[in-house]
Image (cartoon, rainbow, N blue to C red):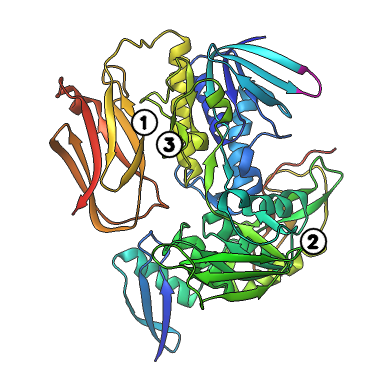
């Protein structure tokens, strides 16, 4: 089997990448999706708030997904469902399997990695206590309630105040469960203010900042959870314990890009994002393998995933059509002083877009600070922000015209400074 | 004089807003750092509304559930009534995005519509 472009994953990133690649002239495209339908995680995100940037209206997850699924179908882009990719090799041979075709191999000219991310599990959190039924990741509970139609429990404690946890606090409450508390290890929430107000405050669900779960009780099924306050060292403070009789613990403790396939292909991974290291064209260290969406770095807004993926699709098309060359100069983009990482990590001034969006996250909450951009040691721009938080992705736009004024430029640094 | 405390949802700042009211009329909003906070506070204390999203079972579909929403926002104090009205609702496949599941739910003048396509199994 031969395809010009194989896209691994049929969620928001894969769909937008496919549409953009087709719009840029690529006919032979295959999307491979392991679930039984396209749309990825959007299918279970039935709440509203998606698409304000892309469609200028507020859609639910399934509605947002359908806009892209419809385009994929209209453009006759091929896709395989219920199909699991087992391996990607450095020379771009994709090995996959499903029930009808068995195991098969595809030669691809280019590959776009769009596998998304997974939730951090109990095992990765090292929570002490028994291992009974009733401990779910928030996303698993979301799938059970919204897609399968099952309720995971009746009395619920949630660890982690990421947006999925907050959304599930409201969802479980509306479906008749009692959500007793949300505990957050950090002194600030990882979720949007809007979700704290509309998912917790609206339903009088308490949020305990600087708290964590210190015990899970119950042998067959969760019977109780104990939380405690943590000090600045994030260790529990004796005497601050609160006990809840409950049958369910939901975990909303962060997302991890799912890069097992990327690593097997030899794609270099950034230890901060756990996603591939990419250049301005979202191309990895392996020629013709691109990455976008949550497999590259975890996003807050699907609108930005779609934008990024469209960019990957366009660049993969240019690669397939032979319009790119690897003989170009590369400039490093460095993250310093409060900036945890940047995507992309390198920029090729000769082939970059006229306006290049560099996205990043800060490492802590900053108030009345500024985002500064340096070309080598020269301050190029400084933009004040009233507040920046790790939960909200930030961006700077780099202009090709400006970079061309500095022919000897070797690195661009983005940092947080006093306003 | 009545005083209400709110957290602004306009941006990550999350300004703590204080609203002074007299006879259900807003006298003053303080604590906001921009206009968004003022607009939000006035709406939230006089006419708070929300879009409600949930899902209902489907008969004979290729998926067991279909997601749905109130087509527009409804008064916040009717959230539970709206959910309650869907308690025993089960619809037949096929379902298309925008199909009306309940019209004029709880006399709000707002319909509950499907937000997903579900085919016949």
Relative to A381, does residue A351 appear above or below in the rendering? above
Check disc 3 and report its element: helix, strand or loop: loop
Residue tagged by mark 3? A271
Front residue of A196/A213: it is: A213
- Let me know if residue A287 is in the magenta part: no
Query: Which residue is the extreme one toward the left?
Result: A378
Start-end of magenta stretch: A98-102
Residue A220 numbered tag:
2
Measuring from the top left, give residue A245's x and y in whole percent: 69, 74
**What is the CA distance from the residue labelled 2 to the residue labelled 1?**
47 Å
Check disc 1 and report its element: helix, strand or loop: loop
- How many marks overall? 3
The quarter of the image holding the C terminus of chain A is: bottom left
Q: Are marks 3 and 2 on the same chain?
A: yes
Measuring from the top left, give residue A135's x and y in whole percent: 69, 57
* Chain designation of label 2: A
- Identified at 30% across, 20% down, the residue is A348
Lower sequence index among marks 2 and 1: 2
- Identified at 42% across, 79% down, the residue is B5
Q: Is residue B52 visible?
A: no
Residue A344 numbered tag:
1
């Amino acid at each position: 089997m031969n395809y010009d472009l194989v896209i691994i994953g049929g969620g928001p990133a894969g769909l937008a990448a496919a549409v953009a690649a087709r719009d840029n002239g690529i006919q032979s495209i295959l999307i491979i999706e392991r679930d039984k339908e396209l749309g990825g995680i959007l299918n279970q995100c039935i709440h509203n708030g998606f698409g304000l940037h892309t469609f200028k209206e507020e859609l639910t997850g399934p509605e947002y997904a359908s806009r892209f699924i419809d385009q994929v179908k209209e453009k006759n882009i091929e896709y395989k469902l219920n199909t699991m990719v087992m391996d990607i090799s450095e020379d771009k041979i994709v090995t996959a399997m499903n029930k009808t075709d068995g195991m098969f191999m595809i030669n691809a000219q280019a590959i776009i990695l769009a596998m998304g991310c997974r939730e951090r599990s109990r095992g990765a959190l090292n929570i002490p206590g028994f291992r009974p039924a009733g401990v779910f990741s928030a996303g698993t509970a979301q799938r059970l309630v919204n897609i399968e139609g099952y309720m995971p429990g009746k009395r619920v404690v949630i660890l982690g105040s990421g947006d999925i946890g907050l959304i599930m606090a409201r969802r479980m409450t509306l479906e008749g469960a009692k959500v007793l508390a949300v505990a957050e290890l950090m002194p600030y929430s990882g979720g949007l203010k809007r979700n704290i107000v509309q998912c917790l405050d609206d339903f009088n669900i308490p949020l305990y900042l600087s708290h964590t779960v210190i015990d899970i009780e119950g042998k067959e099924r969760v019977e109780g959870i104990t939380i405690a306050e943590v000090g600045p060292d994030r260790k529990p403070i004796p005497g601050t314990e609160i006990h809840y009789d409950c049958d369910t613990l939901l975990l909303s403790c962060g997302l991890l890009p799912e890069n097992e396939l990327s690593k097997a292909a030899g794609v270099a991974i950034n230890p901060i994002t756990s996603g591939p290291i990419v250049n301005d064209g979202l191309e990895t260290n392996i020629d013709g393998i691109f990455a976008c969406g949550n497999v590259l770095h975890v996003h807050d807004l699907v609108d930005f995933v779609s934008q990024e993926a469209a960019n990957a699709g366009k660049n993969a098309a240019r690669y397939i059509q032979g319009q790119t060359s690897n003989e170009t100069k590369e400039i490093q983009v460095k993250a310093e002083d409060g900036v945890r990482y940047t995507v992309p990590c390198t920029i090729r001034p000769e082939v970059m877009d006229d306006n290049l969006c560099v996205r990043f996250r800060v490492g802590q909450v900053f108030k009345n600070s500024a985002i500064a951009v340096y070309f080598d040691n020269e301050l190029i721009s400084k933009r004040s922000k009233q507040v920046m938080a790790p939960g909200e992705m930030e961006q700077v736009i780099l202009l090709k015209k400006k970079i061309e004024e500095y022919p000897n430029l070797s690195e661009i640094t983005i940092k947080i400074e006093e306003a | 004089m009545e005083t209400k405390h709110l957290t602004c949802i306009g941006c990550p700042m999350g300004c703590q807003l204080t609203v002074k009211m007299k006879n259900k009329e807003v006298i003053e909003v303080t604590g906001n750092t921009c206009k968004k906070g003022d607009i939000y506070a006035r709406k939230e204390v006089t006419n708070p509304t929300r879009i409600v999203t949930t899902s209902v079972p489907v008969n004979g579909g290729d998926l067991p559930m279909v997601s749905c929403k109130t087509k527009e926002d409804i008064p916040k104090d009717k959230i539970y009534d709206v959910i309650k009205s869907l308690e025993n609702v089960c619809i037949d496949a096929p379902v298309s995005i925008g199909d009306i599941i309940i019209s004029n739910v709880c006399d709000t003048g707002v319909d509950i519509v499907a937000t997903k396509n579900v085919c016949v199994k």
